[in-house]
Image (tube, helix red, strand yellow):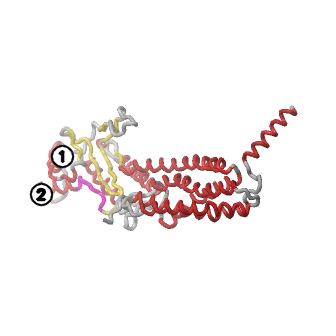
Amino acid sequence: DTFLSASTDDYVKATVAMGIEGIDRSDFVRWEPEDNRGTAIFNPDFDLSTTAAQEFFLQTCEALRTKQCDLDGCQSGSTPATLVLPGGVSCWMESFRTWYTDKVSSATPVLPTGAAFTTELKEFRSQSPEFVSAIGFIDGALKYATIKVTLSLQMEQPNFVSRPIYEAMEDFTNSRQAAAPASVGRLQQTSEFWTWIRTEQGLVDGMWQGLIICAPVAFLVVCVATNNLVLATFSILCIAGVVCSVLGAGEFYFGWSLGTAESISAVIIIGLSVDFTLHLAHMYADSMRADRESRASHAAVTMGVTVVAGAVTTVGAGVLMLFCQMTFFTKMGTLITLTIVFSIATALLPFLALCAVLGPENEVGKISLMAKRAYAMCRCRRTAA
């Protein structure tokens, strides 16, 4: 009952692969991602039956265990911190060596070589279901081999934390590649989580694009609704304050970084926060009174109850999401609630205060009047010419 999806207690799983040169994606269609994902290209010279290749495999396992890491994402709990969690390396070659040593009753650890390696490895694989996917026999031949590791990087970390870990794994495989015998072929690492890094980066980029688009659109909407450039400027400044306050509160109080929910909500925040200031600005602009204090008072009296009622209903919807079990929905509920609270507070306090102190009086800032004057000036210049 207390389970939350995407718990931060989970750590990223990665795989170090040998024998796979690449993937043929010539038939892949980006609009049909579930079909024709690609075909693995295997190294025809891949061979682990030599002593050099086996020693390299075992050394790679040990190097993964002892690889130190001083990055923020490395949370192994050991001193010094390591790239892989303690006990997080699943090395079938070590288990195979122990199994074969016991089988031949050798006093020292030993591994078969040559043709005997394949025969013995097939028998070991049949008795070790946990290593079936790591020992890649295809049509009776060993085509690839993998080392599965559990990194010290926790799931759901932001891009700026997880990307350096990805780069550290890339550096590790590149360094091991330099020492690899020719029969091992290409060494590469992969993880399902690395694909999410690119997705998250796309979401963050989309957030900035959305802000770049939505902010000017919101400004134009307020300009059309109020017909006043000063009120539109006040509104967009307050909206920017709401966006910064919500995202800042998520970081300061909840420790959230810019992730999926935050990237999506950042654009939604503009739409939610413009509503209250827009209504008050519209009432201020429509007021028949001349001085700014009377106009601000008129906006507060005529529209204050309405915007507060709207805020209460929206906060109620956000609060209900807090009882969801999936982390995404609880976070979105928190962000919606924060947005409405900051929006209504900003609209009733800073925005109305700006209007009461610096708000436009009479025809000041009126866009239609400025347009008429500009048109008249243009006509005068044409007449003079």
Label 1: which residue? 117
- Relative to 156, is 44 on the left or the right? left
Q: Which residues are magenta?
A: 87-94
Q: Amino acid at mark 1?
A: Phe
| Whether residue 27 is situated above or below residue 234 in the rendered picture | above
Residue 324: x and y in percent read 38, 61
For residue 304, what is the image quadrant?
A: bottom right
The picture places residue 280, in percent across and down from the top left corner, at 63, 58
SS label for mark 1: helix
**The disc labelled 2 sits on which kind of residue?**
Ser
Q: Earlier in the sequence, mark 1 or mark 2?
A: 2
On-image quarter of the C terminus: top right
From the top left corner, tell me how far across and down residue 44 is, in percent.
Answer: 27, 36
Please tell me which residue lies in front, 230 or 1.
Answer: 230
**Which residue is nearer to you in this view: 356 or 203?**
356
The answer to whether one can see residue 203 in this image is yes
Residue 89 is a magenta residue: yes
Camera-side residue of 254 and 216: 216
- Tell me, yes or no, if residue 66 can be seen here: no
- In the rendering, at what x and y percent does residue 154 appear? 38, 60
> Residue at image x 63%, y 61%?
302
Q: Residue at x 23, y 53 (%)?
A: 92
Q: Residue at x 55, y 52 (%)?
A: 271
Image quarter (top left, top right, bottom left or bottom right) of the N terminus: bottom left
What secondary structure is found at the residue carrying circle 2?
loop
Dot 1, how many residues are within 10 Å of its Cα: few (below 14), some (14-19), or many (20+)?
some
Verify whether residue 8 appears in magenta: no
Q: CA gap, disc 1 to disc 2?
A: 17 Å
Q: Count residues near mark 2 (Cα–Cα under 10 Å), then give few for <14, some for 14-19, many for 20+.
A: few
The residue tagged 2 is 105
Query: What residue is rendered at 33% in x and 57% in y?
Result: 150
